[in-house]
Amino acid sequence: MNTNLNGWTASHAKKAWNFFISTLAIMVSSVALHSYTVREGKCTVIVAESASALNASVPLVSTASSSTGLIFFILSITLRRSKSTYIKLIIVGLIVLTPPLLGYNRNWYIMDAKSTFSTDGRIFNCGGTLGKHCCVQFHNSTVMDEEKRAVVDILNSIECQFYMLIDLIRNSKNKQQSIDMRLLGNTIFKQSSHNSAVHEYILQLYSLSAMGLPPGSEDLATVYANRSAVMIHLWMYEDCIKEIDRAMNIAKNDLLKIKLFCRKARCLHALGLEGKEDVMRKAEALFNNVKNGPSGKTFADLMRRTKLSLDVPIKHKNLSVRDDKKSARVEDLHKKYIINDFSLVDVQYNEKYGRHLVAKRDINPGEIIFIEEPYMHCLDLVRGYTYCFHCLTTCLLTIPCDYCGWAMFCSEECKQQAWVKYHDLECAVYAFAKDNDVGDGVKRMAVKSIICAVREAGGVDQLRDELKAFDSCTDKLKGFVKDGKIQSSGFKSIYALSSNTSDKAEPIHKHNTIMILRALVRNTKYFGKKPGFEKTEELKKDDKVLFLGSLVYKLSKIFQLNSRIIPNGRDFCTSGLDARICENKQCCTTGLYIAPITSLLNHSCIPNVKMCFSNNYSVIVYAVQPIKKGSQLFDCYQQEFYEYNISPRQKHLEKTYNFNCDCKACKEKWDIVEYEVVSKKNLKKNAPEWRLADEYLQLIQAIHDKKIELSEKHIDILTRGIKKACQSLNQPSFMTTNLIRALNVVFRRLYGIEFMIPDKCNND
Ligand SMILES: C[S@@+](CC[C@H](N)C(=O)[O-])C[C@H]1O[C@@H](n2cnc3c(N)ncnc32)[C@H](O)[C@@H]1O
């Protein structure tokens, strides 16, 4: 008798194999008898008599269909004669069963008995049709399949059924609120003491007032006239003339026109331009019509004062909202660096970080790594008095969309371009999707990008086909690298960005999806207008709805993770918080933007790169620490280690970005140290730190206090300091941190998006 070390005999082994094979056969055949698979579009559906049969069947049946099960059973009975047959049978069994066993839980979804889902355009109803338990495996499961399942859940939710059925009030212009804002603006303007913050507030009130007024109305002409009064008050004569002409085009009231002519004559005089006499003649002609009326005396006085002022030489030169020196500097930068040239970096992928950027050579602090043009931006709704919603140009005299109460443009051209490109639909869709939340940018980005993507593709069906083809490509770097070169591919690059949000953010994305989908269904012609279509039972059957719904859901997540803040124009946010968590949203953000390659930067609490949103609609990514060839570039998603303690820092990253940070600062538990106080007294008596403080502290202080005119040379000086600090000091160190912070201020001031409202004015 053959005995092995454990006392097992061949007959034991034979019995064991026998038992194993029989059990396997019984399981398979029982599944075969109690469940069956249906190939439905891109899915395999297993239908079973009971939940337990379903659970048993999932790992087995995923590839072994009922017929395979039967064959298996028959084979095990008829062929169990020789050892080699067993071996063959086992090999076949392993081949058949291993992939599904490994795949169990990954691609199989147990559906509840009543759930309905779409399989590649067709509807499969688990309960309704079959009355049995079922689960489904999505073959070639694409990213969108995940979202489709979520959308079915969303459509089933009570919140969705509620919003689909109720009639929401269109969020649009509000004339009374506009008039109230204008009157408040007038009251503040009449007060005697003004500084730039007051000027800004007055302009904000007037522009918000303009937003809510119908086109061509006398009220709108009055608001424009009031803004022109602010402009002349601020010695911004050229802007004042533009605003006067705008008001004049719609004004019907003679009294208003006389005021405007008088103001225009003063501006022409201040600018030394011809034409003031002609303008005064027009004012005189109108004055003759009103001089005997109730306002005759007031206007006679105005005419007299204006004529007198035209004889006095003007000492103030024209001011402008744009900083010309900065514009020239940014233009020079664009001559030196090609926009969207990513030759200093590589995109790579690994399991831990996903896609990430890696330096192709050693990079010095202060060096610009690349400049990227964003794919899209979205201004905060209250910022319409400083920037154009369409081109983001600095503009204090924006004009409103004719229909909605939030979009403001720098010119008629921008207004028209935006209308043709996206705003005609955005205006209607967002009117119903808008919540009264200042930080609604993610939702608005989703609306705008869907509209643009559908248009660019030529329709919803075409977009679906394009994305399907894109999904079928398994390249991890798709959308970002083409023919070995980093290159973004428009909407597809946005679509390819990470949507790995945490479960905690789910309610927001679901709500965004409901609100946008509702507006797309009810306020666009994307789906045709079938009666009763807004009923969620109907919507669930429509593959176009499921497709667009899932796209909205995915984009909401993508924008939450990948969009970055356009910082407050003039300075650092007081708290430095991420605008999406900052309680005082207006303090630190102008809006959001998304730039695909920049979005591939992963996070570290001690970042080696920083971004600056330039005043020429581009994102400048520059190094703040020495970066070795082959190492990863890291940005900081919220606050750096010196601004936020480790625990809230990590909680926020986990909650918003769904990962656990293990950068050096987190591993070594670096907490806030008193970095803010720029004084040598705070330094430990550490020789290298003292030496660097002697060399740089005064400059750093002067930069923060705006005491010096900055230039590129300051970038070089700080760069040298950072290099020395990184080489000679143990980190974290006071001097390294402060040198890097000063470098960020310099970049922001030299190139950053900014608007200027003068402090000085005619009250001085
Ligand atoms: C803006 S994306 C960055 C690019 C991303 N790696 C990709 O492949 O698209 C943000 C996501 O990247 C991942 N990520 C960022 N920083 C990380 C880090 N330090 N460690 C691990 N994952 C990180 C997280 O999943 C996070 O939600």
Image (cartoon, helix red, strand yellow):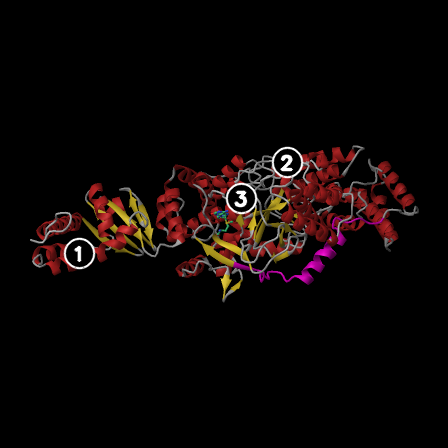
- The answer to if 726 sits in the magenta stretch is no
Residue type, numbered disc 1: Ile
Q: Which residue is mark 2?
A: 177
Asked where in the image residue 606 lies, by quadrant, the reply is: top right
**Are circles 3 and 2 on residues that touch, CB within 8 Å?**
no
Residue type, numbered disc 3: Lys
Mark 3 CB within 8 Å of ligand 1: no
Most foreground residue, 514 or 588: 588
Q: Counting residues from the N terminus, which is met first, the one under dot 3 or under dot 2?
A: 2
- The answer to if 337 sits in the magenta stretch is yes
Q: Is residue 559 shown left or right of residue 294? A: left
Spatial CA distance of label 3 from label 1 is 50 Å
Name the front one of labels 3 and 1. Answer: 3
In this picture, which residue range is highlighted in magenta? Answer: 317-346
- At a point 39% along the width and 47% down the height, the residue shown is 531
Q: Position of residue 432 (x, y in %)?
A: 51, 43
Say few, some or many: other residues with alpha carbon within 10 Å of mark 2 (under 14 / 14 to 19 / 20 or more): some
**Are circles 2 and 1 on residues that touch, CB within 8 Å?**
no
Which quarter of the figure is the C terminus placed in?
A: top right
Q: Is residue 211 shown left or right of residue 117? A: right
Q: Which residue is mark 1?
A: 90
How many numbered marks, from 0 up? 3
Q: Counting residues from the N terminus, which is met first, the one under dot 2 or under dot 1?
A: 1
Tell me the SS state at disc 1: helix
Is any part of residue 308 visible from this angle? yes
Name the front one of labels 2 and 1. Answer: 1
Spatial CA distance of label 3 from label 2 is 52 Å
**Are circles 3 and 1 on residues that touch, CB within 8 Å?**
no
Is any part of residue 213 visible from this angle? no
Q: Position of residue 194 (x, y in %)?
A: 78, 36
Q: Which residue is mark 3?
A: 664
